[in-house]
Image (spheres, rainbow, N blue to C red):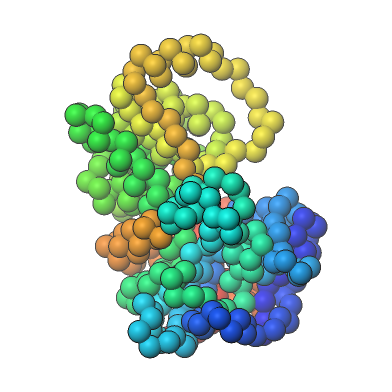
Amino acid sequence: MRAVTVLPQKANSLELSDVPEPTEADVDVLVDVLAVGICGTDAEIIAGEYGEAPPGHDRLVLGHESLGRVRQAPSGADVAEGDLVACIVRCPDPVPCANCAAGQWDMCSNGRYTEHGIKGLDGFMRERYRSSADRLVRVDSALGLAGVLMEPTSIVAKAWAEIDRFAERDAEKQKIALVTGAGPVGLLAALLGVQRGLEVHVLDQVTDGPKPDLVRDLGAHYHSDGIENLGVHPDIAVECTGVAPLVLGSIEVVRPNGITCLTGVSSPGRTKQVDLGGLNRALVLENNLVFGSVNANRSHWKAAARALRAADRGWLERLLTHRVPLDDVRRAFDRGADDVKVVLQIGDLS
Ligand SMILES: [Zn+2]
Ligand SMILES: [Zn+2]
């Protein structure tokens, strides 16, 4: 069968390969891949920055944002033939550490976890894969292709679950949230903020293209005039760009007792003059909380499935700005300026 593969840590080795059918005898659910979302992680793996093939393999099957349909499942399993499913990306480490043992592989403390399409496990840009039922999460069939947003939604579902926990320390109810960045992660973070009943403000640079309308159609406020001109002091900031001045700005802009969640991975080496003493003083005297959030465990994937089910399907589909068939996979990595989420279509959804 066909698969999109790379030689990890070697730049521009992407190819459409012929790979063997999945035959893992002990892994009992067979899934036809329908679509795979593409993100910056894939581009960085293609550029040779990181990535690791499964043990004994040279090439890694790319792709971690999957939507598939169960072709074969044992009776009594949590998923059945015909179900739409997404596969959880990270698998617990073999030791396992205390967190992986508790099902919190998103918090793996020894770094020996594996990740489909990224680190030591093949990904989903292939026609079929096998998985155990406990690694799959059911997706509402009414979502159709928009179900491919499960993985990025799981990331923001975790961020919001953590914010919800930390917010309990504050007797003042949170009302206003800022999201920096109107890419797929930022827009989905805004969606979950609106679903919590918050007044959501989204900051990005662009003034045209689909992003401003996507934000406004959520009932949120769009800003493109810089974080210093926001005009509101949010209770919560969810930083989704990793751009250093916005990271700092999102820490400084929240009100006393506020919470800043960092989800964007910055490129190292960007320096900026910061008054660390002044920043520390402000954080201490205002009881502010700043934390990082990455990856997602099963509870967050299930929260993502609920959030997508409750969202407007037409709005979700507008995030899928570019759909590319498997045979044209190279085109899928030519990002257009107005692209939100590019999707590689592998199987037939109808
Ligand atoms: Zn991704
Ligand atoms: Zn672990």
Quadrant position of residue 266:
top right
| Residue 39 appears in the picture as rendered | no
- Give the x, y percent position of residue 228: 43, 24
Q: Nearer the viewer, residue 94 or 133?
A: 94
Q: Is residue 347 above or below residue 250?
A: below
Q: Nearer the viewer, residue 321 or 72?
A: 72
Q: Residue at 69% across / 66% down in the picture?
A: 54
Q: Nearer the viewer, residue 46 or 201?
A: 46
Quarter of the picture containing the C terminus is bottom left
Q: Residue at 41% across / 60% down in the picture?
A: 298
Q: Is residue 117 above or below residue 187?
A: below
Q: Residue at 76% across / 69% down in the picture?
A: 56
- Give the x, y percent position of residue 50: 71, 52
In the figure, is residue 80 to the left or right of 1? left
Q: Residue at 48% across / 64% down in the picture?
A: 88
- Give the x, y percent position of residue 276: 53, 15
Quarter of the picture containing the N terminus is bottom right
| Residue 278 appears in the picture as rendered | yes
Q: Nearer the viewer, residue 315 or 260?
A: 260
In the figure, is residue 277 to the left or right of 286? right
Q: Is residue 285 above or below residue 294?
A: above
